[in-house]
Image (cartoon, grey):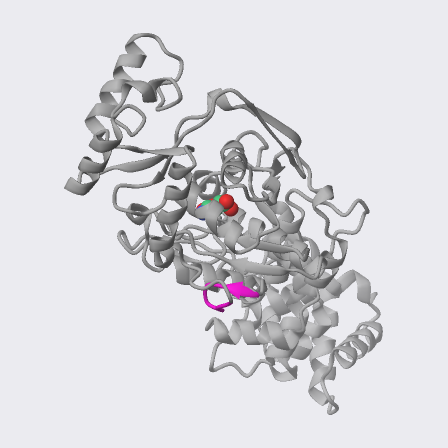
Amino acid sequence: MSVRVRFAPSPTGPLHIGGVRTALYNYLFARKNGGKMLLRIEDTDQNRYVPGAEAYILEALAWIGIQIDEGQGVGGPHAPYRQSERKEMYRQYAEQLIAAGKAYYAFDTADEIEAMRKRLEEAGADAAQYNAITRLQMTNSLTLSAEEVQQRIAKGDPYVIRIKIDPKQEIRFKDIIREWVSVHASTLDDKVLLKSDGMPTYHLANIVDDHLMEITHVIRGEEWLPSAPLHVLMYQYFGWKAPQFAHLPLLLKPEGNGKLSKRDADLGGFPIFPLQWTDPNTGIVARGFREDGYLKDAVVNFLAFLGWNPGTDQELFSMDQLIEAFSLERIHKAGARFDITKAKWFNQQYLKGTSNEALGEILQNNGQWPADTSLDLDKVVALMKDRVTFPQEILSEAAFLFTPPATYEEAVATSKWNTDAQKAVAAYIEDLKIFEGDFLAESAKAIWAAAAERVGVKMGKVMQALRLAVTGAGHGPDLMLTMEILGKQEVIARLEKALATLS
Ligand code: GLU
C-alpha cells in the first residue's frame, strides 16, 4: 500500500513553528517513500475560526518548500478538503455507530452536565466525566425509551451524539516513536462526536477523513497522544483498519524545561511563527522567521533536527538530502530543546552559501539598499556576508561604507596612530594620486606595500592605523576590498581627513 500522510491544521491563528515541523516530517516521510502528502483544513470548531489563518498556512508551507500533492488549495479525488464543507457527510457515520450500539443520543443541557459535575466533585470523585458510569444517570438514549428519544428528536430538542465507551478493555497500539501505548478504556469519557449544531467534533471528523482519504500514517504532535487511544477504539468500532501512528516529541523551552511558548519566544527575542502575522482583531503584529531574515533552507534544516537526527556528524542537509536520510525510526521520544542559537548558526551557514546576486536581491526587495548610492551591491554583499547572521545585517554592519567616519575609535587611535603610521599614510596618499590603473583590492594592497617600504615602515605594523583612517574602527571586514568598494577618490579623501583630524 502506498504511503499517504496528511497535515491537518486548524485555522485558529498563525501556524506555530512546531506545526511547520509536523508538516515537514510528514512531507519528508511521504517523499522518502514515494507517497502522497495531503493538506486538510480542520475547521469544525467555528468558535475558534480566525480569518486569514488558512491563507497563512498555505503561504507558510509554500515558503518553506513543502509541496502538497492533494488537498486544500490543490484539489484531488477526496475534495473538499476543508472539513466545514464536508459537514453533511459526518452525521451518517455517527448514526452508523448508534445503529451498532456504539454511540448514543444525549439530550442533557449544559446546566445538567454542570450539575452532574458538581455532584461528582462533591462526592469526591477523581474525574467528573460523562462516562460509562455517569451516563446511566443522564438524559440520553440509553436511559430514555426509544419512543421518547424519537419524540424529542422530532420535536427538535437539541442533542449531541456521544461515543459509548465499552469500559471493560485495555486499548493497546504501537506508536512508531513511542512503542507500545496501553490505556484502560475505563479512563476514557464518552466524547461528543456530533455537536448539537450538526458539526462533527475533531475526533469524528478526523477519524472519518483519515479513513476516507486512505491515510496510512498519522504523524502529529505529542499533544495528540492522549487522544490516540480514543481514535484507535473508534477505528475498531467502525471496523476500519487504523493508520499507523507516530507522535512527535514536544518542542521545549530554550533552557530545556517545559513546553515552548509564545512568551518564551518574546522573552528570548525570537520568532515562533514562520511568517509575520497581524492579528485581525487586535492588529498586533507577531514576528516571523521569514521577516526576521531567516533563510528557508536554514529553517528547514533547523526544524528537521528538532526531534530527529541522521545518526552521523553531518549537520547541513538540503531538503533533498533530508528526504534521502529521513526515517521515522530515528525520531526520538524526548522533547527537543528549541535552541535559537542553533537556528542562527544554520542561517549563517546558508547565508554563506547563498549567491551574492540572490542576497543583493533580498536587500533591494526589502528596501534597504539605498537608491542613490554609487557603491557596487555585489561587492558589498561579498565583503560582508561571512560576517553576519541575517541578510539585513549586511547593510547595518556596513554603515561605514556609506558614510565617512565622524569619529575614530579612541583606543586604536592612541595605540596605533603614531608617526610611522602617519608617514605611511601620507606616502600612500601621494602614490594613490599618481596611480592610474584599475583600483582593485590587489592594487590597493600593492601600492600600500610600496608606500610603506618607501618610507621605511613595516606594512603590518601600520595596517590597523590605515583601517582606522578609512573606516574609523580598529576591526572590520577585508580592508583592501573595502577600499576597492569605496574607490580611489573616496579613500584619498578619507585618508586626508584622518591626517588632518587625528594628527
Ligand atoms: N486539527 C488538529 C490540529 O490542529 C490535527 C491533529 C491531528 O493531526 O490529528 O493539530
- Where residue 500 appears, as percent x and y from the top left, is 58, 70
The C terminus lies in quadrant: bottom right
Q: Is residue 417 above or below residue 451?
A: above
Outermost residue toward the bottom? 436
Q: Nearer the viewer, residue 50 or 141?
A: 141
| Residue 280, magenta (yes or no) | no
- Where residue 101 appears, as percent x and y from the top left, is 41, 32
Any part of residue 294 in sight: no
- Whether residue 28 sits left or right of residue 132 in the image: it is right
Q: Is residue 384 above or below residue 92?
A: below
- Where residue 192 appears, as percent x and y from the top left, is 36, 35
Q: Is residue 162 above or below residue 345?
A: above
At 35% from the left and 24% from the top, the residue drawn is: 130
Q: How many marks?
A: 0
At 61% from the left and 53% from the top, the residue drawn is: 26
Q: Nearer the viewer, residue 222 or 437?
A: 222
What span is in magenta?
Answer: 69-76
Quarter of the figure with residue 386: bottom right
Q: Main secondary structure of the magenta part?
A: loop
At 29% from the left and 37% from the top, the residue drawn is: 160
| Residue 74, magenta (yes or no) | yes
Any part of residue 132 in sight: yes
The N terminus lies in quadrant: bottom right
Quarter of the figure with residue 395: bottom right
Outermost residue toward the left? 155
